[in-house]
Image (cartoon, rainbow, N blue to C red):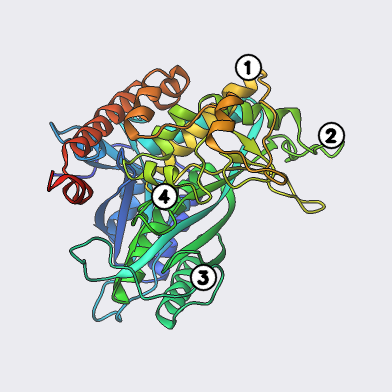
Amino acid sequence: MATPSLTPLVPRDHAADEVARERVVKEGVQLVDLQFSDLTGGVKSLTIPAALLASTLTQGYRFDGAALTGGARHHEIDLYLVPDPTTLAVFPGVGGASERAKRARIYCSVHRRDGQPFAGDPRSTLQRTLEDCAAAGFDYRVGLEIEYYLIRGDQAAGGMPLLPDQAGYFDLGEDLIAGTRDEIVATLHEIGVGIGGAHHETGPGQEELDLLPTGGVKMADQIMTVRQVIRSVAQRRGLRATFMPKPLTNVPGSGMHLFQRLASLDDGTDLIRAKDAPDELSPLARQVIAGQLSHAAALCAITCPTVNSYKRLAAGHRAPRHALWARVGQAALIRVPAWAAGEDGALELRCPDAMANPYLAFAAVVACAMDGVRAGEEPPSPLDESLVAYDESELHKLGVPALPRTLGQALDALAGDDVLRDALGEYIFEQLLSVKRAEHDEYRRYVTPWELARYGDG
């Protein structure tokens, strides 16, 4: 049974704590959800009465840490949720006060009883990685595009029941789709998520939502919120939302493209763009590219963490299959977008999908970038597709490494990657390998409808 702890765990930002407490009282919040991430990126939540927030901010809240393992609960671990008061969000009322208590959400890191971060906490792992990046003088920020499908609420026997939606890329879409999109954007904006644009994607009922650049931990928190809000709004409108990378064979896949920025921690100077370079790309940016390319196979195990992820990558359609970079090319793992005058540079990483644990994905991406910087690596030449499109055989002849074709291949690459082992820490690294290998083994034993149709009369 979870109970409050009795003594303060860590030094607190008392001003931030006070702002959070006052806001909860001012806005009439009755319930507060203490939320955290499990190993695989699922949202875990513990709800407290608003009256307990003050003591929880200063003392933490004891809970069973087995909830962090991604489903493999073997024994209880007494750990403490430590709320981050800057993440407090008050949700707009749904159904009126008489039907539903007003509630807020606050994200938590997980600590041991001695006040130290727990080795199995993804949020603390990202915080540690970003602190290492800051110690080197760099401020890492990221914006992103997240794609998903809205589907009918009823589950058809043959698979995902898509909407009868004929809209295409940037079309307004059916009223049901457009109205759902509008409510998602308005809700996220109201609770303080840094929303950019939202639009219909190329697939039937497929949507894209853009998030403005911010710090890595804040962005990871926001992704957790975005997925919850999208699912909740869709459900209220009789729909379902899926972030599955490849929900059907004949529709485009859904990714989560990261637009990475790197600035000087001292003065905020953009370190990606170099106006005096022929291609406006700084030596540091090239080292970041080289580091991420050299660890691409292992990185996929974290940024593309499901068996379904590799069906998206295998299908192409703006999803990368090889560890290459380009300025013009939808098949590139890393793309250098065009910059407007005065705009900071960015590097777009195109392999991740929204099934990834955002805390671990960002920690891995930053660790690979910093490894390239420390080694002073130089990337291979870019393979731009402005004049020619490269097929598989041509890329093989050029020696461009292919990305893993299955989750199993990606996990094998991860197992041998010491940079990512160090970044994630031994506890998370081994737990993640164990959970994901079990998932892949279960998939390999499963007999699919495709096999029955193909071989059933054999």
The spot of residue 348 in percent (x, y) is 60, 44
Using the numbered discs, state the Cα–Cα distance from disc 3 to disc 4 in whole angstroms: 21 Å
Above-or-below relation of 442 to 169? above
> Gap between marks 3 and 2, in whole Å?
39 Å
- C-alpha span from label 1 to label 2: 21 Å
Q: What residue is disc 3 on?
A: 168
Q: Is residue 40 above or below residue 163?
A: above
Tag in front: 1 or 3: 3
Residue linked to disc 2: 277
> How crowded is the residue under tag 1: few (<14 C-alpha within 10 Å), some, or many (20+)?
few
Nearer the camera: disc 1 or disc 2: 2
Q: Earlier in the sequence, mark 4 or mark 2?
A: 2
Q: Residue at x 22, y 71 (%)?
A: 154
Which residue corresponds to the image point at 75% horizontal and 50% vertical from the top-left?
Answer: 339
Q: Which one is closest to the eye, mark 3 or mark 4?
A: 3
Give the position of the C terminus as an image quadrant.
top left
In primary-sequence order, the first of circles 4 and 1 is 4
Q: Name which of mark 1 and mark 2 comes first in the sequence.
A: 2
User: Residue at position x 24%, y 39% from top?
Assistant: 70
Q: CA distance from mark 4 to mark 2?
A: 35 Å
Give the residue number, with chain letter if any, for mark 1: 375
Q: Are marks 3 and 2 in contact (CB under 8 Å)?
A: no
Residue 285 in which image quadrant: top right
Q: Is residue 292 visible?
A: no
- Asked if residue 436 is positioned above or below residue 235 in the image, the reply reads above
